[in-house]
Image: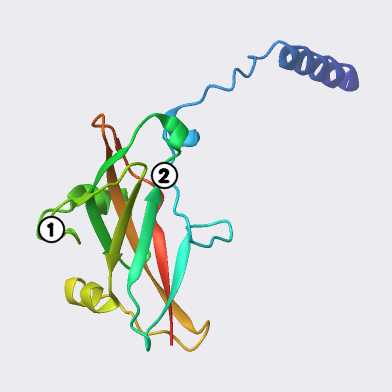
Amino acid sequence: MKNTFINILLLALLAGGSFSCKDDLVYSDLVRDNRPAIPVTFPGTTTYGFNPFIVTSLAAGAPIQFTLSIPSTSGRTIKEITKVVGGATGINVATLNAATATTAFNSAPIAGSGTTAVFTTTLAAFKAKYPSVATAPVALPNYTEIQFLFLVTLDDGTQIVPEPVRVRIVA
């Protein structure tokens, strides 16, 4: 009797499961990729499945330069890089949104040129703006990273926040 009851219960659960809701692949904002209609890429950077990065040497003191690019087929152009924030690798969109003229890295928008815009700075300028962020490479893994986040404005007024980019600083 007990086994019959368990079998009937399992059969009822199996039957109920076959009538469950169909997955329409529409999810809430919390469980979907947030991809802009026009992607911003960073030519000349490297990535291993995470944020794109460039490598610079602390000793060489070379400039830090990121080229932001949108597809030419998008029909849009980059008007400007409206806001830039920098910091350790923990910065995020909230940091960008909270940035003011005094806390943002750039004091004025950086003009775009067609489908590209170029952001250039130095480690010295970064250290002057964010003195509490470590820029000296650590023993292992023999580098440290800093990060930048951009607010890009297109010619039609659309604003895009691309993925963060990093600078890997080696000795």
* Image quadrant where one finds the N terminus: top right
Reply above or below: 142 against 118: below
Q: Is residue 64 left or right of residue 101?
A: right
- Tell me the element at label 2: loop
Residue at figure coordinates x 58%, y 56% from the top left: 49
**Residue at left 83%, top 14%?**
8
Viewer-proximal residue, 7 or 113? 113
The image position of residue 113, as x and y in percent, is 29, 46
Using the image, determine if residue 47 lies above or below residue 122: above
Q: Is residue 153 left or right of residue 168?
A: left
Q: Residue at x 89, y 22 (%)?
A: 3
Asked whether residue 35 appears in the rendered view, the answer is: no
Pinpoint residue 78: horizontal percent, then vertical percent. 30, 41
Colour scheme: rainbow
Q: Amino acid at mark 2?
A: Val
N-terminal of the pair, mark 2 or mark 1, is: 2
Q: Amino acid at mark 1?
A: Ser
Q: Which residue is mark 2?
A: 40
